[in-house]
Image (tube, coloured by chain):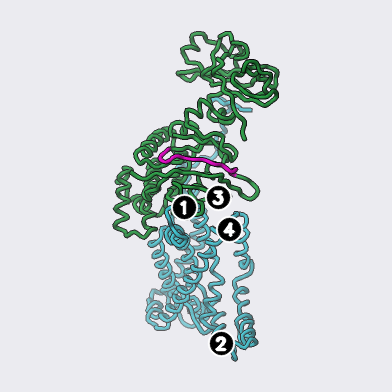
Chain colours: A cyan, B green
Amino acid sequence: MTTVRFLGIGEPKPKRSIRLPLWLVSYVQAMPLTLVLGAFLLLPLIMIITVSFWDYDFAQMYPDFVTFNYTETLGSWVTWKIYYNTLRYAFLVWAITLFIGFWVAYFLAFHIRTSAMQMVLFLVCTVPFLTSNIIRMISWIPVLGRNGLINTALINSGAVSEPVEWLLYSDFAVVLAMVHLYTLFMVTPIFNTLMRIDKSLVEAARDAGASSWQVLTNVILPLAKPGMAIGTIFVVTLVMADFSTVQVMSGGQSASVALMMKNQMSLLQYPAAAANAVVLLVLVLLMVAGILRIVDIRKEL
Amino acid sequence: MTKAAEIEIASVSKVYGSTTAVHPISLKIPAGSYCCLLGPSGCGKTSTLRMIAGHESVSSGDVLLGNKNVTDLAPAERGTAMMFQSYALFPHLDLIDNVAFSLKMKGIDKETRRAKAMDMLKLMQLEPYATRRPAQLSGGQQQRVALARALITDPEALLLDEPLSALDPFLKIRMRAELKKLQTSLGITFVHVTHSQEEAMALADIIVVMNDGRIEQAAPPRTVFERPATAFVARFMGDHNVISGRAGESQAGIVTLAVPSGSEFKVPDADLAQGEPLDVAIRTDRVEVGLQPIDGFGFTGTLSNIEYRGASVKLSVAGAGIEDFTAILSDKVFFAQPVKVGEAIQLSWSPEDVIVLGRAH
């Protein structure tokens, strides 16, 4: 049945009882997000920046405007070494997760034919995330330790006579655990971009005589760049802010910027930690800005 | 200017698992001709084109291009180029790099390939847009880029998968004319997949009508329209009334056609045994209204609808066990003696306008 309605005929619409002035409506609509972001992002940030200029002793902070928190932090070679160490972790983890993440996403997007299977396998990738970060990290210890699975197997098979020491409590262990924790953050955005690549583009490239390798380098990789950039932002910011993985997996032998801040806070040196946080924030923002300059990710958002 | 190749497919079929997309079909497309594969969606026309292009493996049979068996060759080794339905332009490359793509794959240096691509863009009147990305172009321009990209490989045959379906009706007609002009000037073989019989009639030297994975008829457009081979072709090409029934007794070369409701029509030149199924077609514009029909070459029915089309008027008539029989009259004839919906009218046709249709295989 079709109903025909004539314009202008029919019951008058009920008038709204409360009428806001038009200019106010958009402000009201933007209000909830403004409040949330203001309370949970802007306010803490302002507090950190303020505190970073305060004075302190072993027991108390004194409102003040001093810059020695920054000069001490930036003037110490320990800080520079720790930044170097953190950046090294970030680079290694980024390179490895990018490599693994791309190929996992590529396999899921181009080699699994049915979309149902794609979703199943993608969910399998997320299964480790049902447990907490700490548990996943600590579960490496029985595998890598002196008397762990790998060392026992190596010794029993006669490959080595003494346990391999660098497996646990080393940079290797830190990077391994971080790769384990963060690869999915690379897989997801890359998978997302690869799924949007029109399969007929691959055929068009083949029609033009491209080999499989040429299809990859000339069509798929350039089109996957936005996903790679988003994954890179995730992984780099996560690694730069990580302290628990570094502490547990290096056995306290390595340090990261966040770990340094944590130690300062446990010594009640909040202004020093705040100054460190501001420096780290500026560095990470610069890195993200650099990534966004190289790759245009607007299409993905 | 370029060498054109004859395309021959010899009992080629395509089977996906347990479903057969294309039954073994054979077809010869002469060198330098414009061939349209025509049919409804799912009839196997695109699969056939993709098998010629090499993007779909052949389940059985052989594909020959200019007497060379290309069945197992990669798409680029065949001497064909394909234009994809949605054009499949590379969104991350500008027009020059899009057109030069196949030259880059061959390892031709940057200067040479860009110069060649620029020439091709000039030919397509696209040089002002050379540095733009595909997304910044209109549909018609994108299509010309896709053509340029396909033609830069200097193919012997160009394969087009529904090239006009993404365009608006006005542009469709303009690009149609451009395609035909291009084919004539290049002189290469074009194979064009479409579901529009109008497009096929306007463009093709040979129309291949496909249905359900089989070829119903492969012939020049005029033959397909005037002598449709099967009831499917007559219906799909439009402008035909199809009457289905069984052959009755024959007298002096004239067979009686009995339709299920009991009415009978006469069919000349049919050579059929009694009781065999028989379809005939009568062109809608050959039906006359208001004349006393010769026995068996017409009927009286009720006018169920009138459609005014400007130069012509379309009458839908029901009667004699035929639900929808169409007659197209010129406006002059109709308005000389107008009739109203619900009135009984007499339809008639002459014996030579009865087309005997074959059966599908």
Subunit ID for the residue under disc 4: A
Q: Residue at x 37, y 79 (%)?
A: A71
Q: Do labels 4 and 2 share a chain?
A: yes
Magenta segment main secondary structure: strand
Q: Nearer the viewer, residue B277 or B117?
A: B277
Q: Are marks 3 and 1 on the same chain?
A: yes
State the residue position of label 2: A165
Residue at the extreme bottom of the image, as rendered: A161
- Which quadrant of the view contains residue A2? top right
Q: Do labels 4 and 1 share a chain?
A: no
State the CA–CA distance, disc 3 to disc 2.
58 Å
Residue B201 percent location from the top left of the image: 46, 31
Subunit ID for the residue under disc 2: A
Q: Which mark is residue A112?
A: 4
Residue A39 percent location from the top left of the image: 51, 61
Q: Residue B58 carries which label?
A: 3
